[in-house]
């Protein structure tokens, strides 16, 4: 014991290699690496575990000041793996927008966010749909790319709905969430195009085209 610390030292040839630190305020127990001059593992009084920090604010808090460090790595090294889960995040709280399942951030904002109601945000921590993509500094873009080296590889967007439902592409702005719309009505199999919040054109199940009304007698 020395001053405000209680220490247990592990030495070789008279030189400390590792020490166990216990401060007088009982706030944590730390394993200190004298060779790296750093606290590398700590157990806080509240049960939180820190790697690279003596003040863990989560049940497991990993911190690294090294600009070139790989902070976390999960590897299943059996190439014959055919079942099992490499990483699972689970809560028993049920669906709710009051908590967060996953929050991946940079110092300028959210990169990937999974809310407790299972809504996913890219660039936003307030996803209001199943998948919400936001770019606050420019135009948000969704890119789907096949293997361009193979001339026969296709890219697709597939919208599936029930036999009596619709499949829709909504085009909106700050004034309206869908001032324009492309809508396929599975009940009757028609394809319609809305402009300025009103239907402008429809193709019915026979291929007939109606412009300015919802029915057509001929192509």
Image: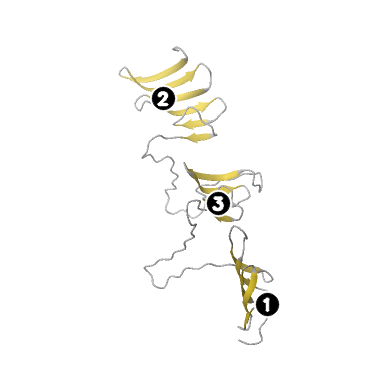
Residue under label 1: 188
Which quarter of the image is occupied by the C terminus?
A: bottom right
Task: Name the residue nearer the viewer: 105 or 12.
Answer: 105
Total labels: the figure holds: 3
17 to 99, vertically: above or below: above
Q: CA distance from mark 1 to mark 3?
A: 35 Å
Regarding residue 160, the answer to whether it shows in the image is no
Q: Which residue is mark 3?
A: 121
* Mark 1 or 3, nearer chain start: 3
Label 2 or label 1, whichever lies nearer to me, is 1
Looking at the rendered structure, the secondary structure element under dot 3 is strand
- Mark 1 residue crowding within 10 angstroms, few (<14) / some (14–19) / many (20+): few
Which residue is located at x 53 percent, y 22 percent?
27
Label 2 and label 3: CA atoms lie apart by: 39 Å
Q: Earlier in the sequence, mark 2 or mark 3?
A: 2
Q: Is residue 43 above or below residue 183?
A: above
Q: What residue does disc 2 label?
A: 32
């Amino acid at each position: 014991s020395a001053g405000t610390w209680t220490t247990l030292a592990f030495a070789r040839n008279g030189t400390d290699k590792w020490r166990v630190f216990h401060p007088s305020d009982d706030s944590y127990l730390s394993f200190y690496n004298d060779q790296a001059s750093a606290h590398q593992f700590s157990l806080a009084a509240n049960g939180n575990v820190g790697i690279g920090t003596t003040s863990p604010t989560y049940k497991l808090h990993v911190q690294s000041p090294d600009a070139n460090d790989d902070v976390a790595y999960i590897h299943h090294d059996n190439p014959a793996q055919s079942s099992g889960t490499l990483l699972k995040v689970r809560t028993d709280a049920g669906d709710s927008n009051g908590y967060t399942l996953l929050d991946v951030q940079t110092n300028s904002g959210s990169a990937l966010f999974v809310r407790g109601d299972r809504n996913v945000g890219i660039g936003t921590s307030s996803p209001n749909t199943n998948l919400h993509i936001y770019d606050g500094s420019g135009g948000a873009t969704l890119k789907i790319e096949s293997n361009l080296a193979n001339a026969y590889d296709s890219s697709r967007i597939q919208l599936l709905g029930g036999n009596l439902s619709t499949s829709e592409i909504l085009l909106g702005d700050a004034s309206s969430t869908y001032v324009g719309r492309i809508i396929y009505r599975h009940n009757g199999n028609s394809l319609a195009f809305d402009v300025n919040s009103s239907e402008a054109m429809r193709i019915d199940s026979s291929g007939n085209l109606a412009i300015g009304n919802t029915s057509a007698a001929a192509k």
